[in-house]
Image (tube, rainbow, N blue to C red):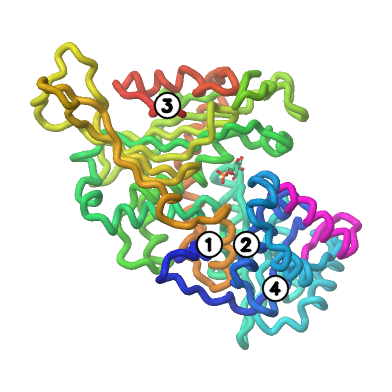
Amino acid sequence: MDSPMNRQAPTVALQPAPRCTLVIFGATGDMTGRLLIPALYNLARFNLLNADFRVIGVGHRKLDDDEFRGGLKHSMEQVVASRGGPAAGFDAQAWDWLMGRTSFLMGDFEGEQTYAQLATMLAPEPGGVIFYFATAPTFFQSIARHLHDAGLLKQGHGRWRRVVIEKPFGRDLPSARELNKQLTRVVHENQIFRIDHFLGKETVQNILVSRFANSVFESNWNRLYIDHVQITAAEAIGVERRSQFYEQTGALRDMVPNHLFQLLAMVAMEPPNSFDADAVRTEKEKLLDAIRIQTPDEALQNSVRGQYRAGVVGGQSMRGYREEEGVAPDSRTETYVALKLGIDNWRWGGVPFYLRTGKALARRQTQIVIAFKDAGHALFRQSAQEKPPSNSLVLQIQPDEGLFFHMKAKVPGSKIRIAPVSMDFRYADHFMTGHSSGYETLIYDCMVGDATLFQRAADIELGWEAVMPFLQAWEDGGEIHPYRAGSQGPVQADVLLARDGRQWLPLE
Ligand code: BG6
């Protein structure tokens, strides 16, 4: 799990990936330009791609190689601009190197002709091939079947073939099961790399290191010391240009069974026997399997849905969700969700896990809060004063990545007065971390065949199983509460915790 982007750590001496070709289906889409190509560029900058590496983009649009590369350049410029402009250090040599080995194949994902042409282009490839499905999910099964029928998934004699599948993987449990069934008919399970880009984030991988390399945390990491856990993935952006996708998806499907559950699994799983892919994934699966399946009534009680209205985010006014282009004026798609979950196992029995995610909130903040119980005996009573908050450990995933421990200390003076203080570790103070989306690590891992950070079929299905009661309960009713863009979300989400005598750590 060494990150290809962390060049600082002396123990990390990664080799360039083995020879391979990356075939991207959906090459003219947003995801390729905004995430995949910038990640490949980062890998190229750090000499982590093989000298014979090639990219073949497959897409519907009528483009020649130069036009395709021109479009990628345009997207890359936008990415660089969003990171503070060329001052952030654009490496033109690495970019030219990457573009010099990038070509385009215009083709219909459902037409045999595309795969015949691809077979010709791949014929001289003696190494590996990664087929990356960056398309709408409706194409996943069909692309896999065509690749199989064209003989493009055959391995042997040092040739490997892998398939990377993006989310959303299904839209509920039955569709995810069906997709897994259809895919594994034509692609071997160990050739399938189901991606969740949260797992590529340094801070997400650091959860396991924090827990299992620091005895001070691990010994307290259970129901005896922990009162509850909060997992937040708040975004300041609205739906932007993705309303067509988002209208059909909503906050729960978009973020919970995948990204939030990956965070949940990392924070709550048992220690694996080793860091081998299978050992880690087995423990994660056991944890997901222990999420209590709620009845529809419980699901309604334990969830809050919201939808943003017009407001101001970061000083900029933002229109309401229903005013976004492509959104129905009476849309009932949730842009915010908060859930209360329980985990039925020895370690976590009785400890609530509160999850929330939403768009157009006060700020971007992805974090896990481990809220510890109060000391057994209240020796220092705060008679007239307000009671300081209990100890908590904040695993800050992004931005301002780090680990913050909130504790109590005596205020200097003759009387005993207690005030909240904090011990902070910030990644940026200790390591030279570059701009990385998480895709760098995951693409590199796929090239070297390390599946630790990818999901098996069972992970995906267990995630859907745990959210099905909410989807079902909402089909029959339940309110969608409006919240102002730029706020903390609907007040009902505060009530969800207040009812248990708890409160969210504010987004600030
Ligand atoms: C994607 C969701 O998977 O993750 C988006 O589809 C969301 O809606 C994004 O914005 C969040 O990822 P990150 O890395 O920006 O936190």
Q: Residue furthest top?
A: 384
Magenta stretch, main secondary structure, is: helix
| Mark whose residue sits in front, 1 or 4 | 1
> Label 2 is placed on what type of residue?
Asn
Task: State the separation of the CA atoms marked 3 and 2.
Answer: 34 Å
Residue density around tag 2, few if under 14, some if 14–19, many if 20 or more, within 10 Å: many
Please tell me which of labels 2 and 1 falls first in the chain: 1
| Mark whose residue sits in front, 3 or 2 | 2
Label 4 near label 1: C-beta < 8 Å?
Answer: no
Please tell me which of labels 1 and 3 falls first in the chain: 1
Task: State the separation of the CA atoms marked 2 and 1.
Answer: 8 Å
Residue assigned mark 3? 506
Residue assigned mark 2? 42
Task: State the separation of the CA atoms marked 1 and 3.
Answer: 31 Å
- Residue 167 visible within the image: yes
Label 1 near label 2: C-beta < 8 Å?
Answer: yes
Residue assigned mark 4? 21
> Label 3 is placed on what type of residue?
Pro
Q: Is residue 383 a member of the stretch shown in magenta? A: no
Q: Is residue 421 left or right of residue 147?
A: left
Residue interval drawn in magenta: 56-79
Residue density around tag 3, few if under 14, some if 14–19, many if 20 or more, within 10 Å: few
Q: Secondary structure at mark 1?
A: loop
Residue density around tag 4, few if under 14, some if 14–19, many if 20 or more, within 10 Å: many
Q: Is residue 78 a member of the stretch shown in magenta? A: yes
Please tell me which of labels 1 and 4 falls first in the chain: 1
Label 4 near label 2: C-beta < 8 Å?
Answer: no
Task: State the separation of the CA atoms marked 2 and 4.
Answer: 17 Å
Residue in the picture at 67% in, 21% down:
317
